[in-house]
Each structure stands twice: as C-alpha cells, then as structure tokens.
Image (cartoon, rainbow, N blue to C red):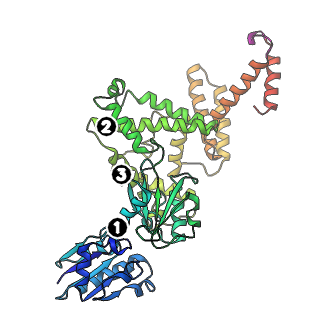
C-alpha cells in the first residue's frame, strides 16, 4: 500500500532523472495524468501505461477533474501493490493533483520522485537567475482575480498560459498593474527541442499563434521603486537606527498637521483636474499612511497586516451583494445597506448615537453634510425639496431680525447648515462646490489685477466690475 508520484520533467528524455527512469523501467503499470506530454513516447517500454485523458473531455472544470484523478489514485494506492502515478514536470510545482493526493491519502504513504520542472529550462532559455526575487504563479489562479498579487519591482513567471482564452483573461488582470505596452516574454515549450521565445507587448499576448499547453509568461521587473513594497522599505530605512534623525523623531501626532495639508493638496489637484499633480499628491498621502504604520511598528502598536486585514474584511462585510447573497438594484440601496451594516458594527462598539463617528476635525461644510446624511438614513429628513428651500429663506429672514451680533452668528450658522442640506438634496457636494467657487473667484480677481493699468486701490468699483464681467465672459 503506497502512492509514488513521479515527475517526468519538461519534455526531453535526457532531463528525466535516473531515479525516475529506474522506477518506471521496473514497474508493471504506471498511471499518467495525461499522455499529452513530449516525453511519453520515449518512456521505458516495459510497464502498462494508463492515463486520465478521457476525463478531460467530460469534466465540467479543472477543479472537479483534478479531484476525480486524486480520488482514483488514492483508491489505487490502497492496493497491496500500491500505485505509480506520473505527472509532467515536478510533482510539487504547479501540480494540483499532488496537493490533493497528499491531503487525502490519510495513512497511505506518499513518496515524491523529483523531476525537473518547467522553471529551470525557462530560466535557462531566458538566461536569468531565479533567485533574484522571481515570483511564480499559475495563470489559472490570476485570471480569477481583478488585480494580480505581484510586486512589479520583481520579475514574475506565470505558468499554464495554455490557450489564447487564458492569455486574454490573464492580460486583463495584469493590465490593472502593468501598462498595456509593457514588454513581456512568452516562453513556448521550455525544455523541449521546439522551445520558442516570443517578446511582445503585454496587450498582444493573446494574439500569439504559438500558445499551447507548454506556454508560460515572463514579466520583467519594472524600474526600481514602482511598488508599495519599495515605499515600505524607504520608510523602514528612514526610521531605522542608521536612518534620518528627523524621521526618527516623528510621532503620530507630530505628523498630523502635515497629513491634513497633503489631503487638501490632493483635493486641490482634483479641483484643477491636474493629473500630473494628482500623481504627486497621492504619493505624498501614501507616504504619510506608510509613515504612520511604520511608527506603529516601531512602537509595537500594530503592523501592516492589521491595517490591511481590517479594511479588507470591512469592505467584504459591507458588500454582501458582492460577497454574499443580498440583492440590490440601485446605488442608493447599496448606501442604505452600508449604513445599516455600519450602525450594526457601531452598536457592537457601544456608540450611543447614529451621529457618532462623524469626525470633529472635518471641515464644517463636510461635517454638516455627513451629519445630515446619517440623520436622513434613519428617516429624519424632509419628504421633498420644497421645505428645504423654504428653510433657507426662513433662516435669511431670521438673520435680518436678529437683535445682536451673537444671534446673527447663530442664525448665519443655521443658514449655512440649511444651504448644505439644500446641496445634499440636489446631490451636490457643498465642499467641492465652494472650493470651485473660490478658485473661480481667484481666477477672475487675477484677471482684474493683470488688466488694471493702475494699483487696485486707485480703481473704481465700476472699473473692477467691468473687468470682472470680461473675465466671466472669457470663461474664467
């Protein structure tokens, strides 16, 4: 009673190990996962060879196919004579049936006979060192994702790109990380006499006519410093004993005002629709996020995985229509579900009010908007927009009748709160709207300054109004 899993190597008989050859030569029967392998016709002639190729035509998917093969091998292994099972490459590299057999064999001994995998001849064909951070993945795993689990600063080797359909799905996922034109290499039949190297842009990989069951994709490393990991390394170095004295001296609180500045600079880039500035400012925000986490690591408070696990679990938990069985038919329903789930979580944290959790440090317009949103989620809202507009008019009138400055300030605050509510009903972000007005005012005022033929204090208001109208007519 035993299971022996033999690696047949990538395809040439001289690459088969002496151990594997001797085992096969002395066997009476050998079960092949598939006969679709260049080496099969050159195997020793003594044993009876059987394969599971018939299952490939009837299985609904690879998962069920490999499970069926594994179950049959495990059953055969319980016989007194056991079973010899041969697979392409190395049994422990990209061979799912091996993993299933090892997991399900129970008390049946499993012996692994090494074989050369596709990796070694691929490295030889590309003339690269596999110890320089090479990431190895299965294309069938990556095509199930929306973002590839790869560090672009390091090279990657992706196996099982066995069809143009797989290549098409693969490139769509990879293009969430790499540019469409990024140069990659398709390696066809590595380790066989017909090996082919094809260097093409990423977006063209599914157009290759040479793709077959022995095709892999090699992705060279990007220019150094292109990854989140690179930023983590920079911050860890700056905070290390041999790092920068200023960075070493920072705390969570000392970075707080700088963090707020960077966030506002992102908003400014968004308002200006300046993508070049947006790239830079988002990088600065990322810097602060990583800086805060590195401080926490140094102080033993928490680590990256704590932050990532928290947000990943939260996003999955709050999207039951994606990762659960809840059905939604609109974005507004998603928002309602989100708020209900959020309130449920807050109850577990013993929050006393639906309005708890709106940060006190938010800009006043944003804070008012968020407070009103939360109140509306639980039904505290007008039925239509008419009373909202009437409330604005009411607050304006109350300002006119206020008896003193203190009361005027109070009524003016009520007016601003009512205007924010009006903006919410119109589905307008009041903070963005006001920021846009501020920028528009600055542009028109700059025009007045540029066109003025004398110092502004010497100009009449009528001249300023005329220049203001000119600026307006020019779309400033």
| Residue located at (37% from left, 78% from top) | 39
Dot 3: within a 10 Å radius of its alpha carbon, few (fewer than 14), some, or many (20 or more) residues?
few
Q: Quadrant of the N terminus?
A: bottom left
User: Quarter-wise, where is residue 191 in the image?
Assistant: bottom left
Q: Is residue 59 above or below residue 352?
A: below
Verify CB contact (< 8 Å) between mark 1 and mark 2: no
- For the residues labelled 3 and 1, the Cα–Cα distance comes to 34 Å
| Residue located at (44% from left, 86% from top) | 58
Drawn side of residue 38 relative to residue 2, left or right: right
Residue bearing mark 1 = 117
Verify CB contact (< 8 Å) between mark 3 and mark 1: no
Secondary structure at badge 1 equals loop
**Marks 3 and 2, the one that precedes in the sequence:** 2
Which labelled disc corresponds to residue 298? none
**Marks 3 and 1, the one that precedes in the sequence:** 1
Residue 116 in picture, x, y percent from top left: 32, 68
Residue 189 in picture, x, y percent from top left: 45, 69
Secondary structure at badge 3 equals helix
Dot 1: within a 10 Å radius of its alpha carbon, few (fewer than 14), some, or many (20 or more) residues?
many
Query: Looking at this view, is 134 or 385 the one in front?
Result: 134
Secondary structure at badge 2 equals helix
Which labelled disc corresponds to residue 296? 2
In the image, which is nearer the foreground, mark 1 or mark 2?
A: 1
Query: Looking at this view, is 322 or 412 the one in front?
Result: 322
Residue bearing mark 3 = 309
- For the residues labelled 3 and 2, the Cα–Cα distance comes to 16 Å
Q: Which residues are magenta?
A: 452-458
Does the magenta segment cover residue 342? no
* Residue 458 visible from this viewpoint: yes
């Amino acid at each position: 009673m035993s299971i022996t899993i033999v690696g047949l190597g990538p395809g040439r008989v001289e690459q088969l190990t002496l151990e594997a050859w001797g085992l096969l030569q002395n066997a009476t029967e050998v079960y092949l996962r598939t006969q679709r392998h260049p080496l099969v016709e050159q195997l020793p002639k003594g044993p009876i060879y059987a394969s599971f190729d018939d299952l490939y035509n009837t299985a609904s998917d690879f998962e069920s196919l490999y499970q069926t093969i594994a179950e049959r091998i495990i059953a055969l292994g319980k016989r007194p004579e056991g079973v010899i099972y041969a697979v392409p490459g190395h049994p422990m590299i990209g061979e799912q049936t091996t993993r299933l057999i090892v997991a399900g064999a129970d008390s049946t001994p499993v012996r692994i006979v090494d074989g050369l995998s596709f990796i070694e001849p691929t490295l030889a064909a590309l003339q690269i060192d596999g110890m320089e951070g090479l990431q190895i993945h299965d294309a069938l795993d990556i095509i199930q994702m929306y973002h590839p689990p790869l560090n672009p600063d390091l090279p990657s080797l992706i196996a099982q790109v066995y069809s143009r359909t797989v290549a098409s799905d693969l490139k769509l996922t990879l293009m969430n990380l790499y540019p469409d034109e990024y140069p990659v290499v398709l390696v066809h039949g590595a380790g066989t006499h017909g090996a082919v190297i094809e260097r093409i842009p990423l977006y063209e990989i599914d157009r290759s006519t040479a793709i077959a069951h022995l095709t892999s994709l090699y992705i060279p490393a990007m220019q150094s410093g292109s990854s989140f990991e690179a930023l983590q390394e920079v911050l860890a170095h700056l905070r290390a004993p041999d790092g920068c004295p200023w960075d070493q001296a920072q705390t969570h609180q000392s970075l707080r005002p700088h963090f707020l500045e960077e966030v506002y600079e992102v908003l400014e880039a968004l308002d200006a629709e300046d993508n070049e500035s947006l790239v830079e400012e988002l990088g600065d925000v990322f810097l602060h996020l990583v800086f805060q986490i590195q401080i926490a690591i140094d102080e033993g408070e928490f680590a990256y995985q704590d932050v990532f696990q928290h947000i990943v679990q939260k996003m999955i938990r709050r999207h039951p229509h994606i990762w659960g069985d809840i059905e939604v038919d609109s974005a507004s329903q998603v928002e309602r579900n989100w708020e209900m789930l959020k309130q449920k979580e807050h109850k577990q944290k013993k929050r006393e009010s639906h309005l708890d959790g709106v940060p006190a440090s938010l800009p006043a317009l944003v804070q008012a908007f968020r407070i009103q949103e939360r109140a509306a989620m639980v039904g505290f809202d007008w039925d239509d927009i008419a009373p909202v507009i009437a409330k604005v008019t009411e607050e304006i009138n109350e300002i006119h009748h206020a008896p003193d400055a203190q009361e005027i300030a109070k009524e003016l605050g009520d007016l601003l709160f009512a205007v924010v509510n009006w903006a919410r009903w119109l589905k307008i972000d009041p903070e963005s709207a006001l920021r846009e007005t501020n920028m528009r005012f600055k542009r028109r005022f700059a025009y007045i300054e540029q066109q003025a033929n004398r110092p502004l204090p010497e100009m009449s208001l009528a001249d300023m109004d005329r220049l203001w109208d000119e600026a307006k007519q020019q779309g400033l």
